[in-house]
Image (cartoon, rainbow, N blue to C red):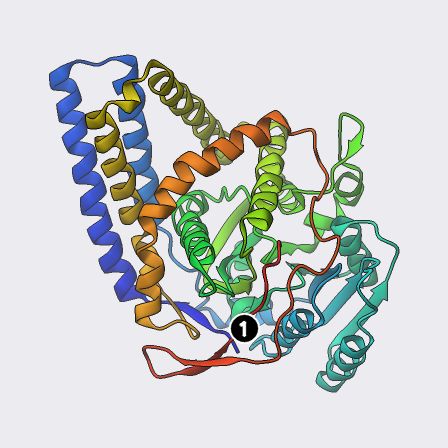
Amino acid sequence: MLRARRLRGVSTVAGGIAGIVIFSFGASHLMGAFRGGITIVTAVYLASVVVLCVQFLAAQLERPYRVDDPAQQAALDRLDIVVLVPCYNEDPEALRRCLQSFFDQSRLPQAICVTDDGSTSGDYAEQRDWFLAEAARRGIRAHWRRTENGGKRMAQVMGARREPRADVYVTVDSDSILDPEAIAEGLKPFVHPRIQSVAAVILTTNVGTNLLTRMMDLICVTMQLGDRSALSTAGSVMVNCGGCALYRGDVLRANVRTYLTETLFGRPVHMSDDSLLTLFALERGFAVQQPSAFAFTLMPENLRHHTKQQLRWMRGSFIRSWWRFKYLPMTHPAYWMHAVKWVMYIAVTAVFLALLLSGVLFDPGVFGWALVVTVGVQFASSARYLSVWRSDQGLGQRWLVYLTAPLAALWSWFVLRAMRWYAMATFRDVSWGTRKQIEVAVTAEHVASVDDRGVVAAQLHGRARVS
């Protein structure tokens, strides 16, 4: 059973040290720029420093939602919770572990809906029979339906139609493994009526496989505990990860037609479903992250799968950006935070290209300083990674992931940035791009590991799967 939690003391220390580094860095550059005069390049650079400092401060203000009022907790206990599990060409063992994690929850859902979206790899008969029997034993309403391939969105809607009265839908990927407290913690923000969706923090199940999985775990967790945490303090989370997210029932029910019929230049859109659901939530109120709710998912272990995944995410992000400008109310803080993000991205990209094409960036002094700044900021921003305890990762392993920060910084700046430009240029490719066959095979063996608190846990190992 995989578990995770935040170490508040470590988080405070890590945040404090990172804050000193970032704010000292920002102050020194502000003073240096004013002494040397302001140019377009320095103006953009300083604006980036200011945005970084504000984002960091906002992220530090994020706190887990708590429920201390017994009446509020009783109201949460009465909610009808339905888990939606779309499945297509998933490894049978990975799917079984996903389903088992729902039965291990401290707050059991009332219903679980599995929709096999026309898998070509098998019929999952063994997993289906076990699941239905176990759900019946625990008093959980269970649905398993096999349909013709219609895509992830249709699979989710088919499940929701089986349980149309749900107060909260929990969306997961078919390889997700939920921490036992994921649903209980994820429900807590819903005591606030205007909160419409809740994002869990997603960790990499196969983090220890190779350098790529370690680096991407650091990048993803840093993004969630940095950029997304900052957005969450304003109720403006832009994208809930597919690994685990919770939505008020009406967020999905009121938008089924739009969800299923989204097109781009006449072509059906089969990706970016999580960001569209989050947009629906933002139109109705606030979208937040619960930093005490965790789930685990498999990540690519080779560059081919990694590239496909990233391009799909980036194309979806670019498409969704236009939708946000069109449909988000201008009175919502999410609208302006999104606008600032794009203005800064365009400005920084323009300066970066200007320095690159002019050859200035190749000056040893300039390049060396840029390298030091990039790596330093990555180290500081990623410090909160050390505050995430997980049962399958000891302290030494956690530091091993953190020390990939220099590679993560360079990969983000040069490889992922170039991929994003390519994704923007090819945004009309709205196909899913993966999952023609099973892309991960979880082995039957488990590697027992002892974490730094002496807790024995099992770590799942498998081949790369693009989720």
Can you tell which quarter of the image residue 377 is in? top left
Confirm whether residue 60 shows in the render. Answer: no
Q: Is mark 1 on a helix, strand or loop?
A: loop
Against 428, is 206 above or below?
below
Residue in the picture at 51% in, 72% down: 181
Left or right: 20 in relation to 286: left
Against 322, is 86 above or below?
below
Quarter of the image with the C terminus is bottom right
For the residue marked with disc 1, what is the amino acid?
Leu
Front-most of residues 308 and 102: 308
Residue 317, position in %: x, y? 58, 36
Front-most of residues 292 and 298: 298
Q: Name the residue under label 1.
A: 460
Residue in the picture at 44% in, 65% down: 208
Q: Residues within 10 Å of mark 1 (few under 14, many from 20)?
A: many
Left or right: 241 in relation to 408: right
